[in-house]
């Protein structure tokens, strides 16, 4: 057929000469097009298809999610072995519990915030040993301070500086837990940010019968001059069952009933002095530490209260 076409000498009224330069099989072009498209589709399928390792990890994660439970009246995230295991691991959040379950540690429970739940406080007195495994940031230090005030701990483990427990690899978690420190070492280390003073004794305990000398000593301890209004505020608060918040300029920020101060204290900022015509409790001093209050002046303190070094407590 191709050779026959070349015999054509006229096209209409015109003379013509036809030369055939090439012969192509259009089926080959179609096959090439099919191959190119098939390659493109297969590449997309490979990109979106999970690797066997990813499938295995997803299955493991789904299993862990099904095992994690809600514990106590606060519905805290916890591993399945929290109740049956004698030892306990306290962490910050749900993601920390899940990451620990990835390495088969199933006795962790999360505090879910800086305020330690009462159920965890009670639980720490029924188990041993108890380890706090916390993030390597300021938030972890705040929670550790809080735990030291209200709960029983045996060891403290921290994530590397700037990292959170939830983002640690298996190797990093194991190493951090292996390097956990006894709580006695934390408390007695003067360079520790959570170092506390001797148990059950406030910074100033001695009562001075002569009120004039008492106020003079207070001013001396707080490094205030004679014109300070602090002693006047202390004198006026006696017998009122009130709590007074004062800023660094000695301006009164609030006056609340002592029963209301814990629930409302966080609404105020820049509190330097807290005058309390009542008993200083463990949970109130923990809140004061988190708010960076410099000094608390109170009538009395709760039994066995530990006073951290970063806050002054004056008993009048």
Image: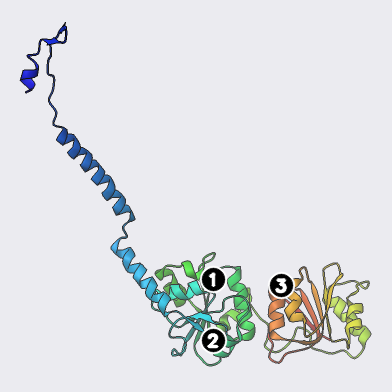
User: Is the residue 226 above or below the residue 31 in the image?
Assistant: below
Q: Give the Cα distance between marks 3 and 1.
A: 20 Å
User: Is the residue 255 above or below the residue 6 in the image?
Assistant: below
Which residue position is annotated with label 3?
291
Residue 304 at what x, y percent from top left?
Answer: 68, 91
User: Is the residue 48 above or below the residue 313 in the image?
Assistant: above
Residue 232 at what x, y percent from top left?
Answer: 92, 78
Side (left or right) of 208 relative to 146:
right
| Badge 3: residue crowd in 10 Å (few <14, some 14–19, many ≥20) | some
Of residues 230 and 58, which is closer to you in this image?
A: 58
Which residue position is annotated with label 2?
72
Which of marks 1 and 3 precedes in the sequence? 1
Which residue position is annotated with label 1?
135
Image point (6%, 19%), residue name: 3
| Badge 1: residue crowd in 10 Å (few <14, some 14–19, many ≥20) | many
Quadrant of image for the C terminus: bottom right
Image point (44%, 75%), residue name: 100
Which of marks 1 and 2 precedes in the sequence? 2
Residue 270 at what x, y percent from top left?
Answer: 77, 68
Circle 2 sits in a helix, a strand or a loop, which is it? loop
Quadrant of image for the N terminus: top left
């Amino acid at each position: 057929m191709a050779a026959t076409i070349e015999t054509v000498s006229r096209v209409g009224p015109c003379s013509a000469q036809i030369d055939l330069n090439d012969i192509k099989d259009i089926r080959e072009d179609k096959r090439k097009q099919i191959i190119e498209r098939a390659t493109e589709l297969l590449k997309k399928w490979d990109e979106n298809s999970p690797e066997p390792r990813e499938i295995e990890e997803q299955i493991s994660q789904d299993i862990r999610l099904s095992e994690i439970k809600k514990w106590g009246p606060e519905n805290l995230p916890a591993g399945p072995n929290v109740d049956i295991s004698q030892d306990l691991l306290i962490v910050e959040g749900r993601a920390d519990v899940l990451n620990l379950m990835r390495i088969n540690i199933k006795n962790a429970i999360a505090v879910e915030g800086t305020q330690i739940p009462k159920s965890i406080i009670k639980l720490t007195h029924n188990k041993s040993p108890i380890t706090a495994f916390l993030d390597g940031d300021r938030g972890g230090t705040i929670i550790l301070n809080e735990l030291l005030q209200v709960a029983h701990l045996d060891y403290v483990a921290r994530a590397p500086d700037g990292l959170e427990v939830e983002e640690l690899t298996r190797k990093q978690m194991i190493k951090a837990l292996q390097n956990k420190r006894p709580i006695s070492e934390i408390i007695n280390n003067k360079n520790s940010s959570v170092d506390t003073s001797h148990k059950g004794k406030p910074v100033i305990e001695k009562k001075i019968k002569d009120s004039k000398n008492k106020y003079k000593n207070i001013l001396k301890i707080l490094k205030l001059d004679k014109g300070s209004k602090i002693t006047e505020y202390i004198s006026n608060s006696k017998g009122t069952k009130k709590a007074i918040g004062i800023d660094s300029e000695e301006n009164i920020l609030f006056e609340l009933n002592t029963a209301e101060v814990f629930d409302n204290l966080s609404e105020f900022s820049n509190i330097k002095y807290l005058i309390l015509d009542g008993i200083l409790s463990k949970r109130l001093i923990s809140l004061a530490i988190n708010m960076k209050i410099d000094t608390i002046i109170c009538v009395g303190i709760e039994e066995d209260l530990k006073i951290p070094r970063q806050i002054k407590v004056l008993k009048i």
